[in-house]
Image (cartoon, grey):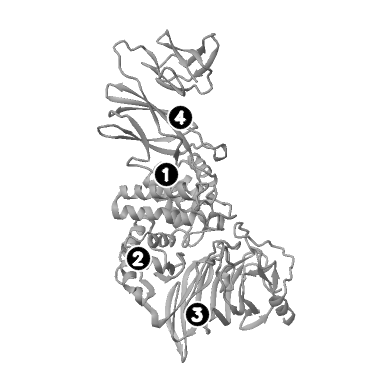
Amino acid sequence: MIIAAIVGVFGWLVVASAQEIPSPTRYVEQSFDVLHYDASLALDSLPQPILGESSCTWILRWRRAPDTVRFHLRSLQVAGVAYVQAGDTIPVEWFVRGQPSDPTFHYAVPALPSHRQGDTVVLRIAYRGTMTGEPPYNGYSWGGVQREGSIVYALGVGFYNNYVSATQHWLACYDHPSDKATFSLAFRVPSSYVVAAGGEELPPLDSGSWRVYRFRSVYPAATYLLTFAAFPSSVLSVIRDTTSLDVPIVLYARRADSAATSRSFRLLPRMVRAFEQRFGAYPFEKVGYAMTQKGAMEHQTMISFPTSLARSGDTVNLVAAHELAHQWFGDCTTPLDFRDAWFNESFATFCESLWREQLGGYSAYLAEQQRKIAAYLNQYAKPGNPSFEGILTMYDFDRTPPSSNYPHVIYEKGAAVLGMLRWAVGDSVYFAWCRELLQRYRYANVSIDTLERTLGDVSGRGEFVRRFFAEWIRGKGWPIVAIEALRSPSQHGWKAAVRIRQVQPDSFGVYTTLPLELSFIGSGDTSHRVVMIGSGDDTFVFDSLGTFTSVAVNAGRSVRALVLLASAPVVSSAESHPDRQPLAVYPIPATGTLWIELDRMPDGPIEIYDARGARAAIVEPARVAALSTEHFATGTYYVVATIGGTVHRVSFSVVR
């Protein structure tokens, strides 16, 4: 035991393992399953972020043949490890695995010889030391334990640390999102301090100059969602609401900020009810926010919220809506590992738009979606912009700077992608999918395969869902489209043939699940039509339009797409003439797209020949067809089509 302790504190002994430990972005099932954490934390030296003699007692179950228990702890010293069995304390050795710079750095504790598969056992870890934050990047540290004057608080993840989950900076735990457990937390602090944390708050215990704040939860939590915030009582205002909802609301803020905080969170009960209507009952025992310098972070039932935003008095409070939505997406239902961080952030960011919809209707929802698309394309995904983070996938994205553990691709792009998915499958299916996920995997874990499979089941459109996930979530980039339209009169006003070509880099792939709303704009009423792009070069025909002179995208009333225009859409006109022929082409001369218009369906394919009689192209039968002439040499060509048994022939020229 003494030797083990010396190695555990001062050395870096690497011991071979029979079971691989997962990385933050790779789930590996362990032989043990943590059921409950019971921690006693001595914050005697506040405001110094120092832990006195503290401990975390685990209740775990051996799900397979007993092997090794693993725990994470950073910048703190292990004082002892023991199993507790039938009232006896059995000290055991512990071993350091890896270097502190490794993403999988941890401690290993062997099982006892008496342990058997299926046993539930108790393990106690004693530790102490100075709590720290994640290593600074460019001078900035976010995750882990932070100090702001006399306030000390914890943020559950880091932006640039290679281990992501940062609860290991204050709690001896298995710090991986795949293993969720219930918890009891006790914080001993000077009597002049108040502690905020997640879970049900029990009456504090007083002992002279000390006070012990206690919290517990019967709802399993991923460790990165645990937190505490210690405030001097002299500066703190605790705002409680126990009447508006079935669960209490509690806000921790500085007294100087209490009025602004109350104003900023004035709509919070309505916010909770709005999300309950969409996703089901609020899943935990309270709604809590602690105003801290850094944030925001969706800790389970005690969200860390930036003081600067609370002071703004913004009653719409999209950030509060975002973090509240996490209580369903990420907290109640949690990814197996951080490859699926997009699930948390994309849904929460999309819920910002749903909150806008709750307050201002569908047009407000569309406007918020458009703001997110513009921010992503014009800032975070635009090379040369100071905020450029690279062109990243949403799932299992590259974390190399300028990216991070939480790049904007999983926020703004993610919200846009979910908005397109909502339109593509319809509201009833989309929200049924959300509720099914949250019910089927309540207090459990999901992966991208789970999400895809569940939506396929709910929608009955498995192949479409597979392509959508492959293109938008597993793939990177976005479509760039070139749009050309032919306007011609019809018996019902005007009709339009629209050719939409995808011209994005090959590395972005071709999108076959792109919902695109076209607006045909003229001096009168604007007409809107939504199409589902299914290939790299599509042509659509619309009738019963008003007079229009231009075409726009993302200007309608239905959907906003993550898309860029290669250039302004080009509109050609085919005016009506008394001697109009069964076969006509526009424009002449052709410089890009040639429109071929027939008065009825041809008997077979439409053929194009050059002046020497060699066939230059063949077009599938259609009333209106678009032919690209970009690769045609300058010269004269002929379009030949058989209509009702009669061969029709018309010439056109190509100029360069």
Q: Which residue is mark 4?
A: 538
The disc labelled 4 sits on which kind of residue?
Asp
Q: Residue at x 60, y 63 (%)?
A: 163
Among numbered discs 2 and 4, the one appearing first in the sequence = 2
Read off the residue under disc 1: 420
Instruction: Tell me the distance, in whole angstroms, between the alpha carbons under discs 1 and 3.
Output: 45 Å
Observer-nearest residue: 68 or 591? 591
Tell me, for residue 186, which label it has, or none.
3
Residue 384 in the image: above or below residue 90: above
1 vs 2, front mark: 2
Identify the mark nearer the N-term, 1 or 3.
Answer: 3
3 or 4: tag closer to the N-terminus? 3
Residue type indicated by callout 3? Ala
The residue pinned by badge 2 equals: 312
Residue 438: x and y in percent read: 44, 57
Q: Decide: is 244 above or below 536.
A: below
Position of residue 59 relative to residue 396, above or below, is below
Residue placed at 69% from the left, 74% from the top?
A: 94
Q: Residue furthest left?
A: 524
Q: Are discs 2 and 4 less than 8 Å apart at CB?
A: no
Going from the N terminus, do you reach mark 1 or mark 2 first? 2
Q: Are marks 1 and 4 in contact (CB under 8 Å)?
A: no
How far separated are the C-alphas under marks 2 and 3?
33 Å
